[in-house]
Image (cartoon, grey):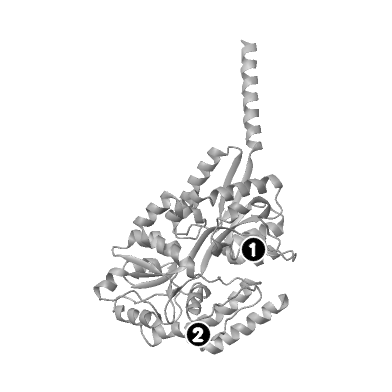
């Protein structure tokens, strides 16, 4: 009896040892993720994690939710500077590429992504994914496109039809439509100012000049186009009474206000599309932002996947494998359908899962079509400081404290001084 008991104990100890060893052999891939988006991302990512780990039992995917994009970067900086346990990856704004690479927080993906795979990502998403941080004359791939969006004009197509109105095709029509559709209980248009540079950029493009060009050390804040675009914003409430006066700090509320009929049109992200379409009881349509004299314009936005610097090779490889799975054509379609973020791979648009969805949801196909008219998003060296200078003066104009020309002249001067150290 005693011999049998000892044998059972030995078997259990051996089994526990094997189990413990198996757990220790797993490569843990921790990813900082911004939770402050308009979709049930934790639920979706739990599903993705379970599916990936079932196919890759030697990997343990751990998402660490950190608030917004800024919170993710702050957490990564704090951990890196404090010598804490680094994550393998992080979702941060695509535009943060210069700041996070210069700080040594991230490393390039080039060793992990072959050219054939890379050529399948949309060029517009890759346009701010490269940075020649080492100064060797060739840009390295620091950002892998994942959670990407564009600026859209959402409009109540039912309301326009009831008023015998066509979708606005230029600034004049947009202003007059918004004015006509404004009532005591409804605004004609809402343009949230939580990210003022992002909303101003399509209007500036539509007037003939983006706020940024190809250089990461030059901006065009006080061009005639930018001044006209900012003046147009002001005119929407001072001349047309079609939108609330002053700063509209209602980014989170605007989609709900549109879906409930309290606004006839809003300028917002593709990421709000699933929520709007599920809540609105009228026909919703979307387009780029009408240009001053016609055409439609937008800029990209959203986050890229970054590979954190200072991690071991096995963890980096495991992170890269998961990142490529997460951005595969099949997964990027699923992510797009469930979150409103746009597919990042061109071949994804050929999958039956996308073509069926686009047939049932033409707004999604229209959102993808805006990529053809997308200009570069504002992304330069010392972005946070440059962007803050612009934001401060835009908000001062909207609050009636400065005039557009003087405000953007001041923003340009402040940005030039910040960027001068890189020139």
- Front residue (pair 255, 303): 303
Where residue 183 sits: x, y (%)?
29, 79
Q: What is the CA distance from the residue labelled 2 to the residue labelled 1?
A: 34 Å
Picture quadrant where residue 153 is located: bottom left
Where residue 29 sits: x, y (%)?
62, 47
- Front residue (pair 340, 206): 206
Quarter of the image with the N terminus is top right
Residue 212 appears left or right of 177:
right
Residue 276 appears left or right of 116:
left
Q: In this rendering, does residue 276 appear at all?
A: yes
As displayed, is residue 335 above or below residue 409? above
Tag of residue 130: 1
Question: Which residue appears at 48% of the width and 45% of the height?
Answer: 47
Question: Which residue appears at 58% of the width and 45% of the height?
Answer: 61
SS of the residue under disc 1 = strand
SS of the residue under disc 2 = helix
Question: Which residue appears at 61% of the width and 78% of the height?
Answer: 219
Q: In this rendering, does residue 40 appear at all?
A: no
Quarter of the image with the C terminus is bottom right
As displayed, is residue 231 above or below residue 272? below
Question: Which residue appears at 61% of the width and 38% of the height?
Answer: 58
**Residue that numbered label 2 is attached to:** 397
Label 2 Cα crowd, 10 Å radius (few <14 / some 14-19 / many 20+): many
């Amino acid at each position: 009896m005693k011999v049998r008991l000892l044998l059972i104990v030995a078997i259990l100890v051996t089994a526990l040892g094997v189990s413990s060893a198996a757990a220790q052999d797993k490569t843990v891939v921790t990813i900082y993720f911004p939770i402050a988006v308009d979709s049930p991302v934790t639920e979706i990512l739990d599903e993705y994690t379970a599916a990936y780990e079932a196919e890759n039992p030697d990997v343990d995917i751990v998402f660490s939710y950190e608030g917004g994009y800024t919170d993710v970067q702050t957490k990564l900086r704090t951990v890196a500077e404090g010598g804490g346990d680094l994550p393998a990856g992080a979702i941060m704004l695509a535009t943060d590429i210069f700041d996070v690479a210069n700080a040594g927080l991230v490393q390039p993906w080039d060793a992990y992504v072959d050219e054939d795979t890379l050529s399948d990502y949309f060029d517009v998403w890759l346009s701010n994914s490269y940075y020649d941080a080492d100064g060797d004359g060739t840009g390295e791939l620091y950002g892998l496109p994942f959670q990407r969006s564009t600026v859209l004009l959402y409009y109540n197509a039912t309301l326009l039809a009831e008023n015998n109105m066509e979708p606005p095709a230029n600034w004049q029509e947009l202003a007059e439509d918004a004015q006509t559709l404004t009532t005591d209980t409804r605004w004609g248009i809402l343009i949230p100012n939580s990210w003022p540079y992002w909303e101003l950029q399509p209007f500036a493009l539509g007037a003939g000049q983006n706020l940024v060009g190809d250089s990461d050390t030059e901006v065009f804040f006080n061009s005639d186009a930018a001044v006209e675009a900012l003046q147009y914003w002001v005119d929407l409430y001072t001349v047309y009474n079609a939108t609330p006066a002053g700063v509209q700090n209602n980014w989170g509320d605007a989609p709900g206000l549109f879906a409930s009929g309290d606004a006839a049109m809003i300028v917002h992200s593709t990421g709000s599309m699933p929520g709007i379409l599920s809540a609105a009881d009228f026909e919703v349509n979307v387009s780029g932002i009408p240009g001053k004299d016609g055409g439609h314009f937008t800029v990209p936005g959203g986050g890229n996947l970054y590979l954190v610097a200072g991690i071991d090779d096995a963890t980096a490889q495991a992170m890269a494998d998961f990142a490529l799975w997460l951005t595969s054509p099949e997964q990027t379609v699923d992510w797009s359908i469930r979150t409103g973020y746009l597919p990042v791979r061109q071949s994804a648009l050929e999958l039956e899962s996308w073509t069926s969805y686009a047939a049932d949801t033409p707004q999604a196909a229209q959102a993808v079509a805006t990529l053809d008219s997308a200009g570069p998003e504002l992304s330069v060296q010392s972005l946070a400081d440059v962007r803050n200078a612009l934001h401060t003066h835009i908000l001062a104009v909207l609050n009636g404290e400065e005039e557009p020309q003087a405000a953007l002249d001041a923003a340009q001067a402040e940005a030039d001084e910040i960027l001068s150290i890189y020139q």
